[in-house]
Image: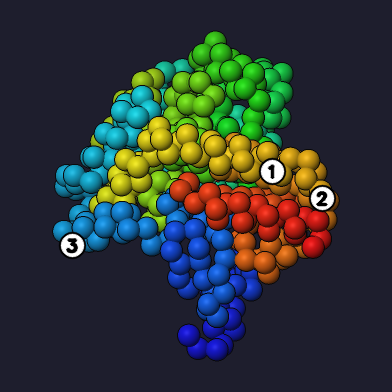
Amino acid sequence: MPKNFKEKDKLYIANTYGRFDLHLVNGKGSLVYDDEGKEYIDLATGIAVNTFGVADEEWKNAVVEQLDRIQHTSNLYYSTPCIRLAELLCTRTGAKKVFFGNSGAEANECAIKVARKWAQDTKGAGDYTIVTLKNSFHGRTVTTLSATGQDVFHHDFNPFTQGFAYATANDLDSVKACFEASPVAAVMIELVQGEGGVMALDQAFVKGLESLCREKNALLIVDEVQTGNGRSGALYAFQRYGITPDIVTTAKGLAGGLPIGATMLFERVETVLGTGSHGSTFGGNPIACAAAVSVIERIDDELLKEVREKSDYIFNSLNGAEGIKSVSGLGLMIGVETERPVDEVLRACMQKGALPIKAKQKLRLLPALNIPMELLKKAVDILKAAAKGE
Ligand SMILES: *Cc1c(COP(=O)(O)O)cnc(C)c1O
């Protein structure tokens, strides 16, 4: 690697990211290495993407096997990896159909299109409002930025897509007020607000939303871009909450490190999209789908139990520990509020060889679902020491 790669990054790549001074070059499982060979326990997994860690043999075999066959066919033809993945997702969730895109934002964009068309087809053209929650995050396209309930994202790119209203998380009355203000097509939520600070919604609020949507003939959309694919301790977090949504979106961890997005359509919206109503050139790409099949097939009851046990271990170790104010989240999606400034704690963790990331003013832990217990223990010890200022 040339010495001036940092200058070249700045010179040639659009400066949209504030990068850490870190260049990861390889790894194995939950250990990753920088360009000087320094080892880190990976608690970030590329933002909940590398579901089974780095260079996992089973995942690699699934990808290479498909690479040896055909890398892309387009949606003009049948593709068996894509069919196999759709079948797996439907049988494991109760969804009836799946639309494949390439990212979380695209999965949500599709959900929004489906909700609008469903409302127009069944209720009338005026019933288009989609209610989302304050502090949510739904993506970076102009429309999914509109869906994102944070004012900081609602500037610079005017005009934004219209038709969104914002309610307060865990406040059912604020959702009801949105229903009274305009005819609602759908409510869209993250069950654990990830970018918003790793906040799990209250069970009672979520159940209340489900009933409200049924009662008012509106759809319930669950954005599981981050919570999905085993991260919550269930295959999808809606299963942990015991609700039946109408649309579930997912992306990040689905293909274990390759770009993919999926919009799962349940019974009420199964037939909303017809030929020509939506599409994507790369959507359902055979390599990404073969990778995703191998990821979903491995997320069985045994693995999910381990995810919940590791989650309990983290919560129990950090709750009440010196220098730690609070621990939030679900499964292996955990937010840690520290007494010391989060940036200081994060830097100390990195220096000691653990890699968490941030969500708002919290540390965010998103380890691989199969992180070995001894590495998790080591990482938690590093975090505790860093929080204490050691
Ligand atoms: C990351 C994320 C998105 C956006 O996904 P991209 O793949 O970056 O487009 C949307 N919703 C949630 C909940 C996310 O965590």
Q: CA distance from mark 1 to mark 3?
A: 45 Å
Front in this rendered view, residue 9 or 53:
53
The disc placed on residue 323 is 2
Side (left or right) of 245 relative to 324: left
Find disc 3 in the rendering and name its residue.
68
Q: Position of residue 4 (x, y in %)?
A: 56, 88
Q: Is mark 3 within 8 Å of ligand 1?
A: no
Q: Position of residue 242 (x, y in %)?
A: 51, 21
Check contact, mark 1 vs mark 3: CB within 8 A. no
Find disc 1 in the rendering and name its residue.
317
Q: How many marks?
A: 3
Amino acid type, mark 3: Asp
Q: Choose mark 1 or mark 2, whichever is in front.
A: 1
Q: Quadrant of the C terminus?
A: bottom right
Q: Residues within 10 Å of mark 2 (few under 14, many from 20)?
A: some
Amino acid type, mark 1: Ser
Q: Earlier in the sequence, mark 1 or mark 2?
A: 1
Side (left or right) of 179 relative to 223: right
Is 54 above or below relative to 317? below
Q: CA distance from mark 1 to mark 2?
A: 12 Å
The reply to whether residue 224 is in sight is no
Q: Position of residue 250 (x, y in %)?
A: 45, 41
Q: Residues within 10 Å of mark 3 (few under 14, many from 20)?
A: few
Element carrying mark 2: loop
Is 257 above or below relative to 308? below
